[in-house]
Image: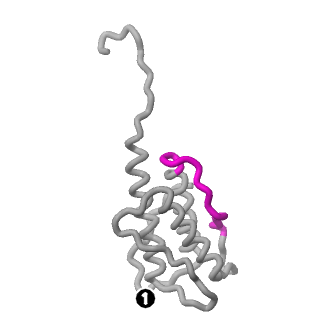
Amino acid sequence: MAWQIPKTNWNSQDYYNFKDLNHVEINTLAVKDLAEVLRGNIELEPIDFDRDMKSIPFADVLNKIERNIGELGNKLYKPKGWLSPKLEWDYNQPFDFTDANRLEKNLLLLYNYANGNVDKIPYCGTYTCGEEVI
């Protein structure tokens, strides 16, 4: 899944909807793909990015998303600026811009760390014998 630029400046005037939650799940999968290059297979709970206007995320969905991001942090690395996931969502508990920022910022930190390290992995090359420039 392709990384999508996250919104990390949510404020109290913004509206959070199903597309934003899909965006978080897509980025979770993108970070997982990069992290697996560095750490091998990482098991996460099911990732759902097919929400629509009829989808209502309940506390169990938010807990799952937070656990997945937390698991990526545990398996990969928790960079400076990491905010602990909120793992105790309860029904009728409000979700606000600070929660949205936490999800997006943690994923961005993980993505930057993983992407920067994947680029540093040495790959085996091919030598061509008999060339004068070698």
Image quadrant in which you'd find residue 18: bottom right
Circle 1 — which element?
loop
Residue type beneath disc 1: Gln
**Is 110 situated left or right of 28 in this image?**
left
* Side (left or right) of 38 relative to 21: left
Work out whether residue 73 or residue 114 is closer to the camera in this orientation and state it.
Answer: 73
- Judge by depth and name the residue closer to the eye, 68 or 53: 68
State the quadrant of the N terminus: bottom right
Disc 1 crowd rating (10 Å Cα; few below 14, some 14-19, many 20+) is few
Residue linked to disc 1: 13
Residue that extends furthest to the top in the rendered view of this protein: 130
Residue found at x 58% / y 71%: 65
Quarter of the view holding residue 129: top left
Residue 108 position in % (x across, y down): 42, 64
Coloring scheme used: one colour
> Which residues make up the magenta segment?
36-50
Q: Residue furthest right?
A: 54
